[in-house]
Image (cartoon, rainbow, N blue to C red):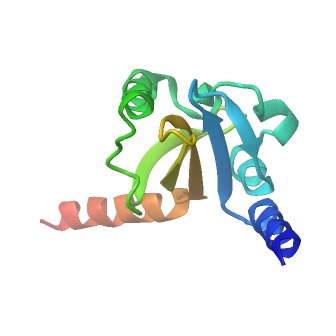
Amino acid sequence: MQPEMDHFADRLVAGMTDAIVYADGDGIIRHWNSGATRIFGFTATEACGQSLDIIIPGNLRERHWHGYRATMRTGETRYGDGQILSVPAMRKDGTRISVEFSIVPFTDDAGQMIGIAAIMRDATARFEELRALRKELAART
């Protein structure tokens, strides 16, 4: 039965329309599914082996890496309990988008952090719609 479950997991990750990106402890991308290619524009070949910086807007990198390194060091994150975080991200062509994501921390047998997987969804259209509605409401008052 186990080979079927391995096949199931591989197919699930590969076929998801959401991005699934796994980065090691140094923030180097080690897995990039077809959903990540659809959302960010980089192929798996282009993304794997690169820093997460390829999808993090420049003005947010310092804050991102501060949190990432703290998570790798302590094993603690405020986003690991199923919470959804919304952040700006960047596509290959430099376009900024809004993504919602949750993370799955990965540890070794000794419990030490070795990487993080992020499951991301493009929320740009919804974010822009909410911003337009807020602007319209503000103009009415």
Asked which quadrant contains residue 68, the reply is top left
Front residue of 25 and 59: 25
Looking at the image, residue 45 lies above or below residue 130: above
Task: Assign the C terminus to one quadrant of the image.
Answer: bottom left
Residue 87 in the image: state x and y as whole percent: 43, 46
Residue 73 in the image: state x and y as whole percent: 40, 27
Q: In this image, 20 relative to 84: left or right?
A: right
Residue 95 in the image: state x and y as whole percent: 62, 38
Q: In this image, 111 relative to 55: left or right?
A: left
Task: Assign the N terminus to one quadrant of the image.
Answer: bottom right
- Residue at screen point 57% across, 50% down: 118
Residue 41 in the image: state x and y as whole percent: 76, 43
Front residue of 110 and 84: 110
Report the label total: 0
Front residue of 42 and 127: 42
- Residue at screen point 37% across, 64% down: 130
Q: In this image, 82 relative to 45: left or right?
A: left
Looking at the image, residue 64 lies above or below residue 32: above
- Residue at screen point 59% across, 26% down: 53
Looking at the image, residue 54 lies above or below residue 115: above
Looking at the image, residue 52 lies above or below residue 109: above
Asked which quadrant contains residue 66, the reply is top left
Front residue of 85 and 114: 114
| Residue lying furthest front | 110
- Residue at screen point 45% across, 58% down: 128
| Residue lying furthest bottom | 1
| Residue lying furthest left | 141
